[in-house]
Image (cartoon, rainbow, N blue to C red):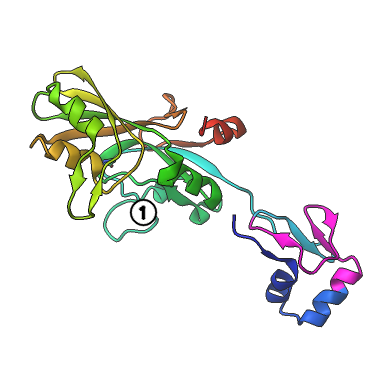
Amino acid sequence: MQKSRIDKFISTVLSVNKREVKLLLARKKVMVDDIIITDAAFQINKFSVIAVNNKILQREQPMYIMLHKPVGVVSATKDEIHKTVIDLLHFPNKETLHIVGRLDLNTSGLMLLTNDSRWSERLTLPQSKVPKVYQVTLKDKLTQDYIAAFKQGMYFEYEDITTAPAILEIMSDYVAKVILMEGKYHQIKRMFGRFSNQVMQLHRSKIGSLDLDINLKAGESRELTADEVENIFS
Ligand code: URA
């Protein structure tokens, strides 16, 4: 998480000069997370609770939200035409949230939102290798050939990348379960596109060890528990 110095924060928020900040620190008027701070270089982050002269200057709680994204809602914080995933939420300060791994307009399922960029980076960095599970319904019948092709990876010329090994399980003639360790642009649709097979329905059911809560109907959301926030990586 991005860190900064307490003296810089106070000087900016209270519009006071360096000398005045030093005085506040020396007079023990500055508290971070309920502890008196006198060191001007003390490191704070966006979730540090900061008070000067007993007045709170910053108190932002980390938020972690699971949303059952419906089809037809756009994975963006603002959009001129479509409803956004933020429009569906009913949490205070929802404008401070960002999306952890987008889904296409016509994809449904598990979407995570947070204001904690360290957590979202951990989930989305390719080297973290957090698996994402999708249910895919196809226009044409699946064959065994798909399994090897997904495992081997596919070269996408436009970005000059080869996809990481992905797992494909055939659930029935037209339904596959796909597990990706990454999230390239329209990745699943493009991978099935190699077989000229059209994706009719796409639904994300799991990220890391976190399943979409079956009690959430499309459009509904809830906060994650502390355990879910931590254990998603395991
Ligand atoms: N792959 C896609 O093609 N679309 C998504 O929304 C997610 C993965």
Q: Position of residue 216 (x, y in %)?
A: 42, 29
Q: Is residue 5 magenta?
A: no
Quadrant of residue 3 within the rendered picture: bottom right
Horizontally, is 44 left or right of 178 in the view?
right
Name the residue rendered at 70%, 55% in the picture.
48
- Pick the front one: 144 or 6: 144
Tell which of 208 and 10 is nearer to you.
208
In the picture provided, is 46 more to the left or to the right than 32? left
Which residue position is annotated with label 1? 76
Q: Residue 28 at what x, y percent from top left?
A: 90, 65
Q: Nearer the viewer, residue 42 or 96?
A: 42
Query: Total marks drawn?
Result: 1
- The residue sitting at the right extreme is 27
Q: Is residue 125 above or below residue 221?
A: below
Range of the magenta residues?
Answer: 24-46
- State whether residue 116 appears in this view: no
